[in-house]
Amino acid sequence: MATELDELAARAANDPALSGTGLEGVILSVIRRTRQSWVAMSDQYLHPEAVIGVGVGYAALTKDGLAVYEENGRPHCELMTVAQAEELARREPARDWRIHLVAQLDDRHYRRVGAGLWEIYQRGPGMS
């Protein structure tokens, strides 16, 4: 499917009928958002709207190994999102930013690998 999207993007970029209409930019934007959405469907990457929280367990954002944010029993509506963590990380991109989600039956650890990309690097059985 990615090759079909690439083909559509190339056609939009090279179609003289679209130049100057702004439609090329809309098509490319839709393709970009679709790709980001597909990436977020798996747990390989964290979606920007995901919260840094697990309920019972441990959830944190760390910078160079030190906790910057911890869940600490906060209500769901007060949990930090991955997008908010990304805002902090963009200010200091050279730092080692990580998100840790340790729940009862699953633990996942993510590392910031680029602007807006938090990729899983370790997975375990959780606290069970």
Image (spheres, rainbow, N blue to C red):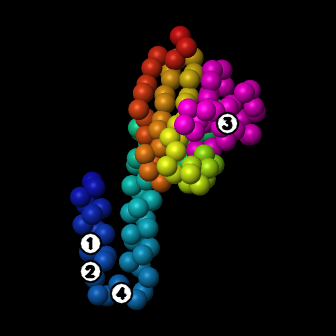
- Secondary structure of the residue carrying tag 1 is helix
Sooner in the amino-acid sequence: mark 2 or mark 4: 2
**Which numbered marker is on residue 19?**
4
The residue where tag 3 is placed is 69
Residue 110, position in %: x, y?
48, 35
- Secondary structure of the residue carrying tag 2 is helix
Looking at the rendered structure, the kind of residue marked 1 is Ala
Q: CA distance from mark 2 to mark 4?
A: 8 Å
Sooner in the amino-acid sequence: mark 1 or mark 4: 1
Q: Residues within 10 Å of mark 1 (few under 14, many from 20)?
A: few
Q: Residues within 10 Å of mark 4 (few under 14, many from 20)?
A: few
Q: Can residue 101 be found in the magenta stretch?
A: no
Residues drawn in magenta: 54-82
Task: Report whether residue 45 is seen.
Answer: no
Sooner in the amino-acid sequence: mark 3 or mark 4: 4
- Frontmost of labels 3 and 1 is 3
**Which numbered marker is on residue 14?**
2
Q: Is residue 107 left or right of residue 38?
A: right
Q: Is residue 114 left or right of residue 50?
A: left
The residue where tag 1 is placed is 10
